[in-house]
Amino acid sequence: MTSVDRWQLPDGIEEVLPAQAATVERLRRRLLDLFRAWGYELVIPPLVEFTDSLLIGLGQDLDLLTFKLTDQLSGRTMGVRADITPQVARIDAHSLAPEGVSRLCYAGSTLHTRPKSLMASRSPIQLGAELYGDDSLAADVEVIRLMLATLDAAQLENTITLDLGHVGIYEAVLSSAGLDAELEATIFDCLQRKSVPDLTEALAKADIPEATAELIVGLVDLHGDDSVLADARELFAERAPEALAAVEALADVATDIRRQRPDINIYFDLAELRGYHYHTGIVFAAYVPGHGQALANGGRYNDVGEVFGRARPATGFATDLKALMALSPVAKAAQGAISMPDSDDPELLAKVEALRADGEIVINTLGGALDARCDRELVGSDEGWMVQNL
């Protein structure tokens, strides 16, 4: 290994340097203050947990994204979190166990064994909010509104498109097909890629009845504007009536969002099942032009807390602070700094303390060399220590 190789980072793992780090931290503070104003309380889950609690009941896709290691104290397997949402569900169900509705939020680093998409980071800084204890569409609408307010607070200059779907549609369509787990996983993958040839081939090999196969393939085309909902009602009316309630739920949520946010473009995708397999109802994502993946996404994931002894209705969303940073306006030039001589003069130190308390950056001059950020300096005079321009 050459000396150059020693400085290389793994693919998809980035360091955040001072200017970008300042932007990320400003965003983090601003967004957590926004969540607090909406009634969401901050929690800080651990970076690692035993896989018994971190992954149980949450599907193979999250398992594959999780780095695993052996705890040298207990000998048990631990995982580095790839998603904070299940941890917050554990906190709500077990550590807090409140009665009624609870609202929690978080911000922290995660780690993925592989990128979730071509350009995605493997070390996103995940920020999100979760609402527990309410199974109504009003709770889903609140979380979607908060997601949109989060993107507004990031001061994005792009138009936001809200993508809406519902897991119940997929489940209702497939429930009558009697598929085994392997075939269902294949169909799920084909639907996510919207690959009609692969989907048709998989259904033909499994000898699925023609009417059922047509219904499943029909999901691929159910994406677009409000006309999609009308097409879905017609398609499901006789073949999968159990899906109609989910279609109406989407219509109701869209109506509520438009009433409050008429500026938002809404796109329906009834075969979109983004994220992890623990979602159970409404799923949603926000997209902006020029960013190939969802900037924020979430959905309903009822009863994840059951594995911790307390099933709870739940809905929430998450975003990546690094992705928000990349799309936020370029920050103004950083404020200048004040140079101070390397001295233990009590009057000087008192002046420095007062300046720092007022938000100024005061940097000690070591070895007589000024820090490049300094545009002013502290100079002693008969009247005391004064700030002068350099």
Image: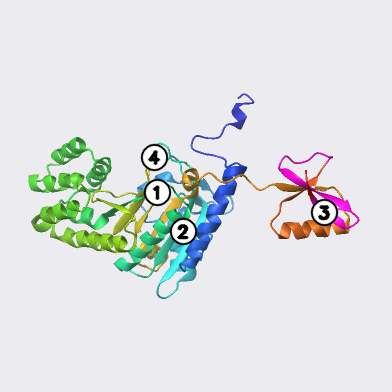
- Determine the CA span between mark 4 and mark 1: 27 Å
Q: Secondary structure at mark 4?
A: loop
- Determine the CA span between mark 4 and mark 3: 49 Å
- Determine the CA span between mark 3 and mark 1: 58 Å
Quadrant of the image for the N terminus? top right
Give the residue at mark 1.
62
Give the residue at mark 2.
87
Q: Earlier in the sequence, mark 4 or mark 3?
A: 4
Quadrant of the image for the C terminus? top right
Q: Position of residue 360 (x, y in %)?
A: 71, 54
Q: Is the residue marked by circle 2 packed among few (<14), some (14-19), or many (20+) residues within 10 Å?
A: many
Give the residue at mark 4.
290
Q: Secondary structure at mark 2?
A: helix
Q: Amino acid at mark 2?
A: Gln
Colouring mode (rainbow / by chain / secondary structure / one colour): rainbow
- Asked if residue 172 lies left or right of residue 13, the reply is left
Give the residue at mark 3.
386
